[in-house]
Image: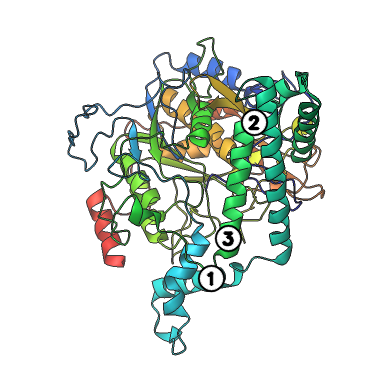
Amino acid sequence: MKKIILAISLFNFFANYSFAQTETPKGWHLLSPSKDSFYGIDLAKAYQIAKQKNSKPVSVIVAVIDSGIDTLHEDLKKILWRNPKEIPGNGIDDDNNGYIDDVFGWNYLGSKDGRSVKKASDEKSRVYHRFKERFSAKDLDTNSFNQEDKYLYRAWLKSSNEIVVSTEEQTNVAYVEIALRTLKKNDAVIKEDMGKEEYTIDELEKYTPKTDIAKRAKMGFLSTMKIFGIEADVKNSTIIEEIGSYVDGKKAAIEAKDKAPIDYRAEYMKDDYNNIHDIGYGNGDVMGGTPMHGTHVSGIIAAQRNNGIGMDGVAENVQIMALRVVPDGDEYDKDIALAIFYAVDHGAKVINMSFGKSYSPEKKWIDSAVRYAAQKDVLILHAAGNDSKDIDVAENYPNPYYLYTNERAPNFMTIGASSDPKVSGSLAADFSNYGKQTVDVFAPGVKIYSTLPGGNNYGNLKGTSMATPVVSGIAALLRSYFPNLTAVQVKEAIEKSATVGTIEIETFKPGTTEPIALTELCRTGGFVNAANAVEYAAKMNIPTKKTPIKKAVNVSKKSSLKTMKTNQ
């Protein structure tokens, strides 16, 4: 799920938009802690060192498994991956990979007639209703369960406990819905008075209404925005759309116990969901109608650098492969697994996954895909999530631990979101999940300026979704300038070079005002530094020939899929 950042308080729920603090420079996350006094990644120094070490960097493909990408954006269109073996628009699977017209990647949430799923239910509801008849039977014999049955039964028990929404949360949703209706009324008045359909908060603040009703509408709209803490550059249409999505999702969750979720796959994709070998569903429309999140993520990684427009991504010499699996709701495990397989088979060396959920009934499929990526030397980076939770305890999927063995995938990184005390009052972002064993590093994820859909739009978002592509960009930089490094070595360079966040750097445990050191929140105890990572990589014992990652299994896609079939 492209996670809306939800906090405990009623009105502190709004999406990925940063809370207004002091004036923060655009692209602060790229700055130097020593030179610029912001806890960014020191990118300028990183390139200075990298270019001294290698004057002929190689191109790197980064797969963005997300909600879709605006392929026409001025800062992205030149860095998009294009399938060299596919002829656009001819309706033929030219490269015989099972996907027709997969020019920029693939939309796993699409239909053959060109439509795309925009909304989906949460996985909790799907798990509850899918297994309700089986696991609520009076004569259920749990002693006869195999490992998979036990895993699914535990998930169902958890869903049956969590599917009941508290009265307090129901009341909160009702209040938000009332606020949304008022916003829509005020918005209609403002648009008519301004004579245009879209405006930013900043434009509204500077606008002088022509009528008294418009003055009241302006005051009401801005008052609500201050309660929500919305940034000045966010558009009215985006605000209303995101709050509407939040309300719809919460209302669906309230009804979920008695009402089974809509089966969007049956209507759109029409695949056999229980068959991992049934591929080729979907379509080539990687924008898919909901590309905001994926567009922003892609810009953070690799928006064209030094072109004099918009903003600069972290990495140069990058091609972004677009794989759409994330709707407004929880993604499906099958889509995630097949997207990873696709990315690996088509040359991606880094995979960014800025999404997450609390249930994963087909985790075995994703595990097989992660193993396959490990064997093929591909680094996977995943967002820790935005619930201010300890994910050493709370479940957050996908995760680096394989089912049943609890073995940790060697090519998988989990990223928390850092900030700067001048940006949001703490080094650790207040919404970020954490985990001393599970989260590897923190990276800037608050008030991150990047590309937005519309061809030439840009804006600030926040979340571990934004922190993860910062690290993916660093990984791509290392793989470009040090192409002989393995995925595991790139992971090591990023982790070992992280700047340790001590208690002296103002840091609070996410979701609290409790002072804490970053060493208590993640494995490395640090936040990423690109310059340090480049220096570390330059000193590593770079092999002349890459060796397979130890403990990786399923040495080919064929054997990997066979393993999944055997385990079904």
What residue sits 80% from the left and 27% below the top? 215
Placement of 52 over or under 27, stated as above or below:
above
Rendered location of residue 527, percent (x, y): 65, 37
Which residue in the protein does label 2 denote? Answer: 236
Q: How is the image coloured?
A: rainbow
The amino acid on which the numbered mark 3 sits, given as a three-letter code, is: Ala
In the figure, is residue 192 to the left or right of 396?
A: right
Distance between the Cα atoms at labels 3 and 1?
10 Å
Q: Residue 253: give its label.
A: 3
Few, some or many C-alpha atoms within 10 Å of disc 3 (few <14, some 14-19, many ≥20)?
Answer: many
Circle 1 sits on which residue?
258
Is residue 112 visible in the rendered image? The answer is: yes
- Quick one: SS at disc 1? loop
Residue type at numbered disc 2: Asn
Q: Gap between marks 3 and 2, in whole Å?
A: 26 Å
| Element at label 3 | helix
In contact (CB < 8 Å): disc 3 and disc 1: no
Residue 206 falls in image quadrant: top right
Q: What count of labels does the image hold?
A: 3
Outermost residue to the bottom: 139
Instruction: Work out whether mark 3 precedes mark 1 in sequence or the reverse, and give the earlier one.
Output: 3
Q: Residue at x 31, y 26 (%)?
A: 82
For residue 498, say whether it is visible: no
Q: Is residue 546 above or below residue 374?
A: above
* 228 and 319: which is toward the camera: 228
Q: Mark 3 touching mark 2, by CB under 8 A?
A: no
Q: Quadrant of the C terminus?
A: bottom left
> With 81 as the anchor, is 398 left or right in this view?
right
